[in-house]
Image (cartoon, helix red, strand yellow):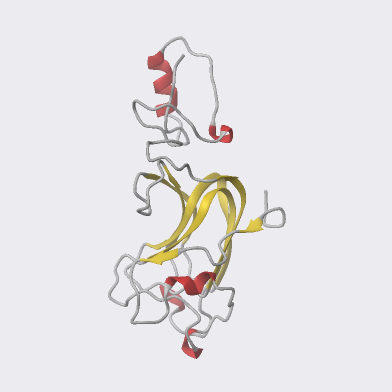
Amino acid sequence: MNSIDTLEIARNKPTKQSTNMGSIRHSQNAVDGDYLQSPKKGDFCTHTDKADESSWWAVDLCAIYEISNVIINGRNDGCCVERFSNFDIEVIKPCRNNPNWFVDSVSELCYHQQAPITFLNASCHTRMFGQYVRIRLNDPNPLTLCEVEVHGTFISYPRSVTIPYTCGFQGYSYEGHSLTLSSAIVKSDIYCTYMCAVMKECHVAEFN
């Protein structure tokens, strides 16, 4: 799957960031369709506070998608390029329908970028499903994003109930999308649990 086959799914979706720099450069600027990469010329980009030591930005896609790639336009006005380096792009899948972002969720690393960049088209290294995409700096720098695109394929809407689902919790059965299911023939519930424990992509096992 690539961006040619998928839709841009982040435009005008709800966003958040760890902090704001003053009263401008809010998180929504990264999905407003304006690709100007110079925050000095106006309120076109996001910007976390300079004192923020754990800067991040995230978008709520409002549904579960299979994420193919994330396109990031950083600032290219010659300032502070070194700040936008050593960061992670994460895909976050909720384990229940919770209004609080990232609560009861599973986060997976889509892509890590070490070197400084002003533009990046990052493809997830494996198939990933989620509702949120988060860009998180690993160094104590402010984060500036001028436009972010997320490309993916629709899977399902979040459930309206608040009981655990998708990721699996003890005492609850799986009720998510069939693409995340796999099966195997085993002789006992203990071995079934063991197989899930050694698989990175497995979050719940059921023996019957």
As drawn, 32 above or below 110: below
Q: Residue 100 location in percent, x, y?
A: 35, 53
Q: Residue 9 location in percent, x, y?
A: 59, 59
As drawn, 34 above or below 151: below
As drawn, 190 above or below 22: above
Total tally of numbered discs in the picture: 0
165 to the left or right of 69: left
Q: Residue 207 location in percent, x, y?
A: 44, 17
Residue situated furthest bottom in the rendering: 41
100 to the left or right of 15: left
54 and 178: which is toward the camera: 178
Rendered residue at 72%/57% (across/down)? 4
Rendered residue at 30%/71% (across/down)? 52
Instruction: Write down the quadrant of residue 50 in the picture.
Output: bottom left
94 to the left or right of 111: left
Q: Residue 41 location in percent, x, y?
A: 50, 90
Rendered residue at 27%/75% (across/down)? 51
Rendered residue at 46%/36% (across/down)? 166
Residue situated furthest right in the rendering: 4
Instruction: Write down the quadrant of residue 128 in the picture.
Output: top right
Residue situated furthest top in the rendering: 187
154 and 116: which is toward the camera: 154
As drawn, 91 above or below 28: above
169 and 113: which is toward the camera: 169
